[in-house]
Image (cartoon, helix red, strand yellow):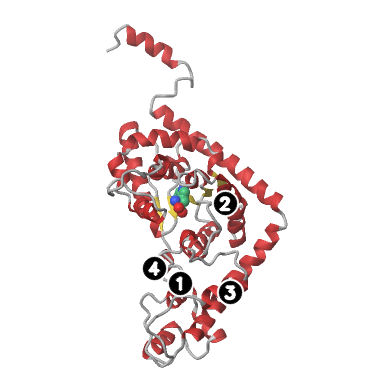
């Protein structure tokens, strides 16, 4: 039975376990996943801890990946991913994904892969040289270069229709759709073309780092982590990048590139003004005052701390509960991975049979060989 024909709505999304998850993950994806999981609209929700993908540029640091498996699972559980409604699984425990990746690699060109903007920007971020640069010595690990193909395997193995993720993953989805179309065109209608599902609020799609950099990223050291304690959060927000020209309170402030206001765009709700900052009815009023001069950064930051804390406090409490029962977290991962492995294995069977490499699924090849040598036309 093909999911393609079943009309099922299936979610697959994932994260690399290279570190704790941060606010960027939360607004860009985690928060949405919880909503989708609870919406009852989906037949399946699968969440992948992409350790194999993380290893593509961390071959020399397996411990880092291992240490973050439970950590990321804790992040998921503490934001409200419910193992009764969603399957949390670990990529390396799903061998069918490796086989699918290997077959899909034949359906993409190296030229196409080198045009992938996410791979390009991550290359820069991680200090890899690309092949166009003058120094060709460094190069890329081949696994890193092809990880978009492995991501296509992740998505298609579950016959996912919907991939809720951050804007930065759009090129991966585009690549996946191309692979699906190519596969189906050659081998028959087996795979499902997925769609990306982005947060509605634009600032939630790509949250800048606390230093004003376009992206919150562990390697840039500009993250607020879901597991940060209240003191750390306060310190990070108080040190946040605002408007360097806003020196005196009376000076007019600028909103462009001002993280405090970007974060307020992403997180604050109107009712929080009445509670924490009754001087203003809403964010527009607050911005208005700021840009006309007379509103200081510290006051803005203090409000942002309240807003962020309101969000992080319950997550922290949940985390403490799960941290007290790590064996339960382990069981959730193990059960989820087994379920996912079985599902991906089914897709791999279909793929192999469509590709005519299912030799040992019945012995049809014997009769075929006889026809072949007898000049079957
Ligand atoms: N590449 C994603 C990231 O860096 C993680 C990921 C792996 C993923 N497999 C996926 C996301 C499948 C969506 C779907 O965050």
Dot label at residue 202: 4
Q: Position of residue 303 (x, y in %)?
A: 53, 82
Mark 1 falls on what kind of element? Answer: helix
Q: How many marks?
A: 4
The residue lying furthest to the right in this view is: 324
Q: Is the residue marked 2 within 8 Å of ligand 1, measured from its CB?
A: no
Question: Which is more N-terminal, label 3 or label 1?
Answer: 1
Q: Closer to the camera, 2 or 353?
A: 353
In the rendered structure, are the residues bearing label 4 and label 1 in contact, judged by CB atoms less than 8 Å apart?
Answer: no
Neighbours of disc 4 within 10 Å: few (<14), some (14-19), many (20+): few
Mark 3 secondary-structure assignment: helix
Residue 272 in sight in this render: no
**Furthest residue in direction top, as rendered:** 374
Residue marked by disc 2: 86
What is the spatial separation of the Cα atoms under label 3 and label 4, in whole angstroms?
22 Å
**Circle 2: element type:** loop
Q: Earlier in the sequence, mark 3 or mark 4?
A: 4
Q: CA distance from mark 1 to mark 3?
A: 14 Å
Rendered location of residue 149, percent (x, y):
39, 42
């Amino acid at each position: 039975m093909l999911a393609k024909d079943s009309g099922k709505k299936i979610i697959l999304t994932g994260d690399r376990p290279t570190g704790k998850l941060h606010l960027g993950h939360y607004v860009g994806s985690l928060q949405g996943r919880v909503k989708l999981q609870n919406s009852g609209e989906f037949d399946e929700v699968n969440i992948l801890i992409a350790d194999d993908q993380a290893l593509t540029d961390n071959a020399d640091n397996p411990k880092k990946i291992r240490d973050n498996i439970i950590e990321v699972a804790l992040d998921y559980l503490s934001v409200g991913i419910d193992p009764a409604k969603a399957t949390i699984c670990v990529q390396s425990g799903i061998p069918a994904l490796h086989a699918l990746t290997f077959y899909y690699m034949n359906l993409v060109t190296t030229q196409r892969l080198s045009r992938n903007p996410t791979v390009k920007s991550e290359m820069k971020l991680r200090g890899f040289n690309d092949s166009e640069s003058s120094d060709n010595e460094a190069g890329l690990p081949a696994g890193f270069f092809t990880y978009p193909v492995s991501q296509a395997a992740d998505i298609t193995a579950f016959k996912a229709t919907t991939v809720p993720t951050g804007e930065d993953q759009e090129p991966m989805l585009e690549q996946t759709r191309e692979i699906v179309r190519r596969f189906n065109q050659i081998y028959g209608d087996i795979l499902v073309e997925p769609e990306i599902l982005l947060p509605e609020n634009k600032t939630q799609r790509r949250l800048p780092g606390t230093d004003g950099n376009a992206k919150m990223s562990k390697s840039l050291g500009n993250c607020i982590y879901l597991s940060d304690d209240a003191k750390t959060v306060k310190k990070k927000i108080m040190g946040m990048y605002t408007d360097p020209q806003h020196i005196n309170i009376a000076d007019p402030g600028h909103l462009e590139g001002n993280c405090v206001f970007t974060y307020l765009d992403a997180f604050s709700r109107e009712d929080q003004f009445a509670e924490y900052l009754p001087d203003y009815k809403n964010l527009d009023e607050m911005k208005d005052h700021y840009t006309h001069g007379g509103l200081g950064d510290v006051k803005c930051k203090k409000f942002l701390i309240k807003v962020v804390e309101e969000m992080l406090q319950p997550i922290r409490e949940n985390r403490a509960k799960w941290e007290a029962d790590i064996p339960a977290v382990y069981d959730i991962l193990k059960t989820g991975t087994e379920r996912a492995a079985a599902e991906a294995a089914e897709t791999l069977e279909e793929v192999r049979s469509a590709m005519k490499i299912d030799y040992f699924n019945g012995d049809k090849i014997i009769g075929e060989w006889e026809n072949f040598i007898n000049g079957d036309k």
